[in-house]
Image (tube, helix red, strand yellow):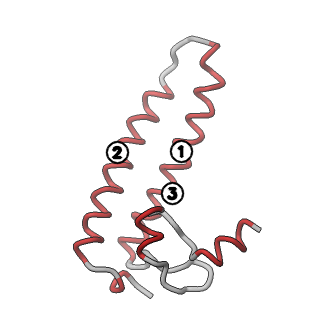
Amino acid sequence: MSTDTYDQEWLTELQATLTHEFEAHTARLTQLTADTGDPAEAHTSAALIVATRQSLERISGALRRLTAGSYGSCEKCGTTIPRERLEILPHARFCVPCQQKHNG
């Protein structure tokens, strides 16, 4: 399945939104990695850095799939991921049944 399943206007808006989120997360990561010198913040900052990097990875994956034309196809079974799921979770890589199996 390909991005042909979804209307182009929605995909264009989604790509713009994901790009904006990527830029915002990148800026946040830059702020988080700046050494404040406060050891009390080190643990919290480390957790936020990990979470921000994971978000960047998910967003960049979705952007790659959009560019490649494979966005919205389940990476496990190849079925089309419903648009409703992608509107809630735009970086979804699996349909719900495959996600449930993946989480096991």
Q: Residue 79 at x, y = what percent? A: 53, 86
Name the amino acid, label 1. Arg
Which residue is located at x 32 percent, y 64 percent?
14
- Tell me which label, 2 or 1, sits earlier in the chain: 2
- Tell me which label, 3 or 2, sits earlier in the chain: 2
Q: Which residue is mark 1?
A: 53
- Residue that extends furthest to the left in the rendered view of this protein: 9
Helix, strand or loop at label 2? It is: helix
CA distance for labels 3 and 2: 13 Å
Which residue is located at x 44 percent, y 64 percent?
62
57 or 77, nearer to the observer: 77
Q: Quadrant of residue 11?
A: bottom left
Q: Quadrant of residue 46?
A: top right
- Tell me which label, 3 or 1, sits earlier in the chain: 1
Please tell me whether residue 14 is drawn above or below residue 77 in the rendered image: above
Q: Which residue is mark 3?
A: 58
Which residue is located at x 37 percent, y 49 percent?
21
CA distance for labels 2 and 1: 12 Å
Name the amino acid, label 3. Arg
87 or 27, nearer to the observer: 87
Q: Which residue is mark 2?
A: 23
Name the amino acid, label 2. Glu
Which residue is located at x 33 percent, y 80 percent?
6
Q: Is 92 placed left or right of 71 in the picture?
A: right
Q: Quadrant of residue 16?
A: bottom left
